Image: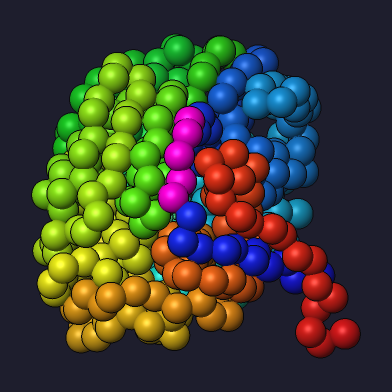
Amino acid sequence: MEDKFIIEGGIRLKGDVRISGSKNACLPVLAASLLTTEKCVISGVPRLADVRTMIRMLTELGAQIGVQGSQVTVQARELQKTGQLQQYARKMRASFLLMGPVLARQGEACMALPGGCAIGKRPVDLHLKGLAALGAEIRIERGFVKATARQLQGAEIVLDFPSVGATENIMMASACARGTTTLVNAAAEPEIVDLADFLNKMGAEVTGAGTRVIRIKGNPSLQGAVHTVIPDRIEAGTYLAAAVATGGELRLSRVVPDHLRSMIEKFREAGVCIEEGNDELFVSAPQELRPLNISTSPYPGFPTDMQPQFAAILTTAAGTSRITENIFENRFLYTDELVRMGASIEVTGSTAVIRGVRGLRPACVKATDLRAGAALVIAALKAWGETEICGVYHLDRGYEDLEEKLGGLGCRIRRVTEQAANL
Ligand code: EPZ
């Protein structure tokens, strides 16, 4: 069964939208709950396909899970071997975040190498280099990574690149290693800080999270913790872009403006008016956007997860914009779909040149990954008429209650479930 969205564009979005908990914060926190035999209570967990996949994997590993709305309790008294996880590992790259916690807890872990995806090869060499530095023996056999370690030992680790997932896996493994780990050139995203907060509540001693040097003093007996994950800064940025696409005005509640600093600056540079409260944002869009030059980089730079959404709004800016993607090797697949809607975009190497056109036209388009899907929703909101978006399952991975939230802002959106074409 293939779901698709039908969106009628040209309607100004107005009203209030409450931002959900962060997908990219709750996935590592859920994985980290395996580091203790005691109960962890995690609130603000969004109802997303990727979260359900992570919960299924924790259950397969033997954890007791309770889900009540956005609160998830996890208690992993005993852990099974990771053998039975293989079916999930290829479905979601973030499943690799179980490597560190299971290795730390069990002394061994076996995970399928995550496959590449629409935005690039996405290897895990930095994860494995970090775990090896902590004393793990790593073997790669027939597409699986097998790691064993009798006792993880703190170490000094320098990452070639501030990889978010590698930073998270190393933090979790170090949290119950003997001694102290210093992680240099670490990722500094807010989701890293949130994971550090959770690990500290469990009894680890993590300092420096949010900077490029993180120190983790291990504690072999971590305890249960109660935690609320931070709001989703990429979901918030996506709704800001939706308001801008329709010349609308929105109030976003439950946000941390500082987490969106680089994208707020870019919206303002384009002429968008954004006012900040302590946990809310007010956005009102100009009639026309000024063109922008954007270059993605690790936090606190401009987030790669927002470049497709910005490309969508810049398709009708008053001039030519340039977006350079420095994090992933080919995160411009979605531009072909925007061109089908009348955009003028040329991709050369890692740069997309976007010449502003007068308007977009509705079309039948296909999402190739989560944020590509978000870009197509934003373009559909802008196009006059009905746009059909296939591959909605990508959006269900990362946007909680998308139809309800957009519908509540005046958008005419409906989900159609079709028999899969090959039946
Ligand atoms: C996290 O992915 C996010 N996912 C991604 O969000 C986000 O785009 C990315 O960080 C960058 O910010 C989650 O947090 C679940 P990386 P991750 O390791 O950890 C290369 C979304 O839409 N690399 O920082 O996989 C890699 O190929 C998703 O919510 C290595 O070469 O990102 C990529 O080019 C998409 N070797 C770059 O680093 C490694 O061992 C960034 O990867 C690891 C990564």
Image point (21%, 39%), residue name: 273
Image point (63%, 49%), residue name: 403
Q: Quadrant of the N terminus?
A: bottom right
State yes or no: residue 13 in magenta.
yes
State yes or no: residue 114 in magenta.
no
Question: Is residue 207 placed above or below 369 in the rendered structure?
Answer: above
Image-based side of 418 in relation to 96, left or right = right
- Ligand 1: quadrant of the figure: bottom left
Q: Position of residue 125 (x, y in %)?
A: 36, 62
Q: Depth check: give the residue in front, 41 or 321.
A: 321
Q: Magenta stretch: dominant SS?
A: strand
Question: Is residue 346 placed above or below 190 in the rendered structure?
Answer: below
Q: Depth check: give the residue in front, 330 or 178.
A: 330
Image point (23%, 28%), residue name: 275
Question: Is residue 231 placed above or below 350 in the rendered structure?
Answer: above
**Could you tell me how many numbered marks the image carries?**
0
Q: Depth check: give the residue in front, 325 or 29.
A: 325
Q: Which segment is the magenta one? A: 12-16
> Which image quarter: residue 337?
bottom left
Q: Position of residue 247 (x, y in %)?
A: 34, 51
Q: Position of residue 110 (x, y in %)?
A: 61, 54
Image point (58%, 80%), residue name: 364
Residue 356 is at least partly visible in this image:
yes
Residue 120 is at least partly visible in this image:
no
